[in-house]
Image (spheres, rainbow, N blue to C red):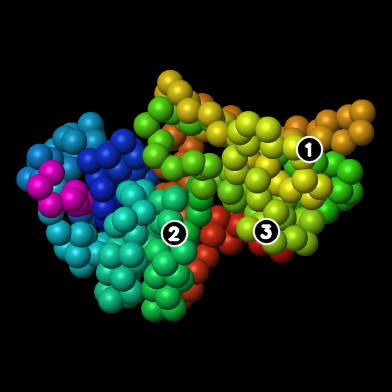
Amino acid sequence: MAEIKVGVVGCGGRMGRLLVAEAHAAEGCRVAAGSEAPGSPLIGQDLGALAGVGTLAIKVAADAASVFDASDVVLDFTVAAASTAHANLAADRGRALVFGTTGLDEGQAEAVRAAAKRAPIVWAANFSLGVNLLASLVEQAARVLGEEFDIEVLEMHHRHKVDAPSGTALALGQAAARGRTIDLSAKSQRVRDGHTGPRRAGDIGFATLRGGDVAGEHTVMFAGPSERIELTHRAGSPQIFVRGAIRAARWIAAKPPGLYDMTDVLGLKR
């Protein structure tokens, strides 16, 4: 099998550097290009030196389009504001995109869905094997347990995370909603403050914690009469997300246009 040429947009960020290092080390992959936002002081630096893997003789570009031109698969863990442009570039160039950005609004999400009609895109809130297995268990538990069990999703991340609840927490809420056959947008309780009154029956609640360098912790609680079931995943390092993204890159490299997620990559789709 030919080497997969991997590009990374946002290659100078925390996740971007890890993605470059993992792609460089991964069998069957070759780092082809990387970019940062125009005006970044990292532009022109060697991509490998920036990621701590030695000189690769590839300079950080200011133009994301050049990354798509040079790559078979592009990895994007940037920010929601850049998502539409990167999805459109994938569609225009017919390149595969592995997309892990969270916090998109509906317009941005629709742009990704539209781009997937012309390019293969893996879009996942979380690329770890454990979290995706957790989502399957949450859906099953929500289906089996009756409405006398209240559902609460608790998440904690490092102090630098900019969106809340996390994309993974929302994905777990969606899994619970599927199990209950309800619309999460109509049954989601994001904020509690002051005199809120009793808990609304059937809601799926979210609570958010931020601090330190926590890579990611998620717990889904099913609180019923005289008993509580808790399903938890704790990420020890962001490396688990990076490994999953490279696995997704290998998987999607030869796929036709379409919108995929990690259940497709891992063979968990029902």
Q: Main secondary structure of the magenta part?
A: loop
Residue drawn at 69 percent across, 37 percent down: 196
Residue 150 image point, x, y percent: 80, 41
Residue drawn at 63 percent across, 31 percent down: 194
Query: Which badge, 1 or 3, comes first in the chain's sequence?
Result: 3
Q: Residues within 10 Å of mark 1 (few under 14, many from 20)?
A: few
Q: Residue furthest front?
A: 195
Judged left or right of residue 196, residue 130 is left
Query: Which badge, 3 or 2, comes first in the chain's sequence?
Result: 2
Residue 244 image point, x, y percent: 48, 46
Whole-angstrom CA distance, mark 3 to mark 2, is 17 Å
Judged left or right of residue 194, residue 242 is left
Query: Which badge, 2 or 1, comes first in the chain's sequence?
Result: 2
Residue 219 sits in quarter? top right
Say what amino acid the circle numbered 1 marks.
Answer: Pro
Q: Which residue in the protein does label 3 denote?
A: 186
Judged left or right of residue 141, residue 118 is left
Tag 1 and tag 3, C-beta contact below 8 Å: no
Residue drawn at 10 percent across, 47 percent down: 39
Residue drawn at 33 percent across, 65 percent down: 84
Q: Secondary structure at mark 2?
A: loop
Q: Residues within 10 Å of mark 2 (few under 14, many from 20)?
A: few
Magenta stretch encompasses residue 39: yes
* Mark in front: 3 vs 2: 3
Residue 198's disc is: 1
Say what amino acid the circle numbered 2 marks.
Answer: Asp
- Specify the segment rendered in magenta: 34-40
Depth check: 193 or 9 in front? 193
